[in-house]
Structure formats: structure tokens, C-alpha cells
Image (cartoon, helix red, strand yellow):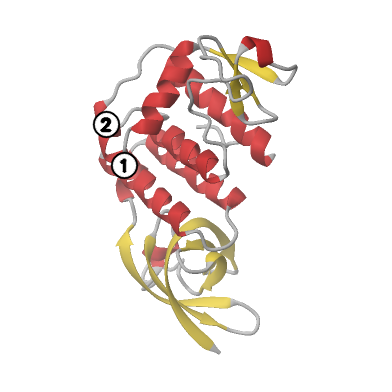
């Protein structure tokens, strides 16, 4: 048996036996890991607070032949304030759900992006959708779909009217659109551009307003489904 220490965040937690939990961790060094937490459902359990989703800390894990077992956790943050606001809580759950669906191996940049998004969502007064929109934009960019541009990639013309090519993952002009394209309003694109260029710690300072912010979330949700085959959880 070997023991490892890894920075990780709990992205999913399920019951196992009477007092045990199986947790899904996304770790900085090892990517997605499953581990058992024994006896943590009891009121006096030493590690009971570490079994919950959003728990971020240094996990010590004993690797046995059958299953990984969490033996200790030094909690860095549990983002407790998310539980005080239903909208922020479910937005955080949606972020973790994205990670659960797309993450596999170690990805330090994704790990950092998760922590930034959750810290902003938990501690800053940021409007609904802003954090998850920012997070999705970063995900698409990491996948090679950095689509914030003022020119059509096919003909290099300026984009005064934009269509999004879901097959290619880019904005195109009316002359280059195909049957797989959907028109995106200027308000929606302006919201996407502002979110893309604003750091997490400045999101609280922006107000997109109008229909642009709702349209931006709907557009990013559809693009996520198209790129990955998964639907975002509703919140």
C-alpha cells in the first residue's frame, strides 16, 4: 500500500454503506480520483466536513488494492457561503458538473480555473451566470475554440452581423454561414467579449444588462452540449 498527498476538490459525493461516502475528487496532480471516506456520516466524525462537494484541501489518500481511502484532509476552503444562496449554490454545482463531465487526467490550468471561479462566486457580489459564463469561455479556449474575434475566419471580412458555426466553433459572416450556423445578436456577442476580457476578480464590477447576459449563457450552454455531448444542469 502507498500513500499520496494531493491538492484536490470534491466534485461529487455519494453514499456508501451506513456511514461511508465515495467521493469524486479532481486533483491538481492526478486528475479525477475516486476515494472512500469511512465513517464520515456520523455526527462526531473527524472528516465529516471534508466529504461535502466544494471541499478544497490537501487530501492524504491511501492507495489499496481495491479502493483509495482518504485518511486525512487539511481543508483550505469549503466555500461554505455558497450554501446560503440557492442561485450561487446551483451555479457552483453546475461548474463542478462541467468538471465531472470533461475532466480526466491532471490539468493544472483547469484546476486553477475552478478555484478562481468558485472563489469569485462565493465571495464576490457577482451577478448570476457571470462566473459560469467566464468558466465556459475558458473551457472552450482550452479546447481550441477561442472564438472571440471581429473578423470572419473564412473570408477575413469584418463581422457586423455574426453567425456561429457550431461545426467549426467560430463566428462567420452572412456570406460564409452554413445550415449549422445560428445568428448571434450584437448584445450577446458584446457580453461574451466583456466576460472573456474581464478577470474573475473584476467580474463584480461589470453589469452587462439587457438580454445580452441571458443570451450569452444560453449560447454557451448550447455550444457546450454541441462540443461535448453533455447538457448543463439547470439552475
Furthest-right residue in view?
Answer: 179
Residue 136's disc number: none
Q: Residues within 10 Å of mark 1 (few under 14, many from 20)?
A: some
Q: Quadrant of the N terminus?
A: bottom right
Furthest-front residue in view?
Answer: 156
Furthest-bottom residue in view?
Answer: 1
Q: Position of residue 210 (x, y in %)?
A: 39, 11
SS type, badge 1: helix
Q: Position of residue 10 (x, y in %)?
A: 46, 59
Residues at badges 2 and 1 in contact (C-beta under 8 Å)? yes
Image check: 185 left or right of 5?
A: right
Q: Residue at x 70, y 30 (%)?
A: 167
Q: Is residue 56 above or below residue 37?
A: above
Q: CA distance from mark 2 to mark 1?
A: 8 Å
Residue 120's disc number: 1
Q: Is residue 53 visible?
A: no
Q: Is residue 94 above or below residue 216?
A: below
Closer-to-camera residue (140/144): 144
The quarter of the picture where residue 72 lies is bottom left
Q: Residue at x 26, y 34 (%)?
A: 202
Image check: 234 left or right of 4?
A: right
SS type, badge 2: helix
Closer-to-camera residue (173/15): 173
Residue bearing mark 2:
204
Q: Is residue 44 above or below residue 132?
A: below
Closer-to-camera residue (190/230): 190
Q: Position of residue 176 (x, y in %)?
A: 67, 16
Q: Residue at x 32, y 39 (%)?
A: 200
Q: Is residue 47 visible?
A: yes
Closer-to-camera residue (220/157): 157
The quarter of the picture where residue 166 lies is top right
Q: Position of residue 125 (x, y in %)?
A: 26, 33
Amino acid at each position: 500500500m502507498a500513500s499520496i498527498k494531493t491538492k484536490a476538490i470534491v466534485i461529487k459525493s455519494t453514499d456508501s454503506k451506513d456511514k461511508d461516502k465515495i467521493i469524486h475528487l479532481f486533483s491538481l496532480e492526478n486528475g479525477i480520483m475516486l476515494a472512500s471516506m469511512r465513517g464520515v456520516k456520523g455526527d462526531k466524525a473527524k472528516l465529516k466536513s471534508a466529504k461535502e462537494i466544494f471541499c478544497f484541501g490537501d487530501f492524504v489518500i491511501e492507495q489499496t488494492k481495491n479502493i483509495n481511502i482518504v485518511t486525512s484532509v487539511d481543508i483550505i476552503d469549503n466555500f461554505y457561503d455558497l450554501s446560503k444562496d440557492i442561485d450561487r449554490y446551483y451555479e457552483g454545482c453546475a461548474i463542478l458538473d462541467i468538471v465531472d463531465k470533461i475532466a480526466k487526467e491532471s490539468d493544472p490550468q483547469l484546476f486553477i480555473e475552478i478555484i478562481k471561479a468558485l472563489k469569485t462566486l462565493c465571495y464576490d457580489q457577482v451577478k448570476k451566470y457571470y462566473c459560469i459564463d467566464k468558466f465556459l469561455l475558458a473551457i472552450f479556449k482550452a479546447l481550441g475554440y477561442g472564438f472571440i474575434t471581429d473578423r470572419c475566419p473564412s473570408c477575413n471580412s469584418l463581422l457586423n452581423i455574426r453567425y456561429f458555426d457550431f461545426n467549426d466553433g467560430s463566428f462567420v459572416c452572412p456570406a460564409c454561414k452554413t445550415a449549422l450556423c445560428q445568428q448571434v445578436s450584437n448584445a450577446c456577442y458584446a457580453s461574451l467579449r466583456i466576460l472573456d476580457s474581464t478577470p474573475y476578480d473584476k467580474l463584480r464590477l461589470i453589469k452587462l444588462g439587457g438580454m445580452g447576459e441571458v443570451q450569452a449563457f444560453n449560447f454557451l450552454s448550447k455550444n457546450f452540449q454541441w462540443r461535448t455531448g453533455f447538457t448543463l444542469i439547470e439552475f
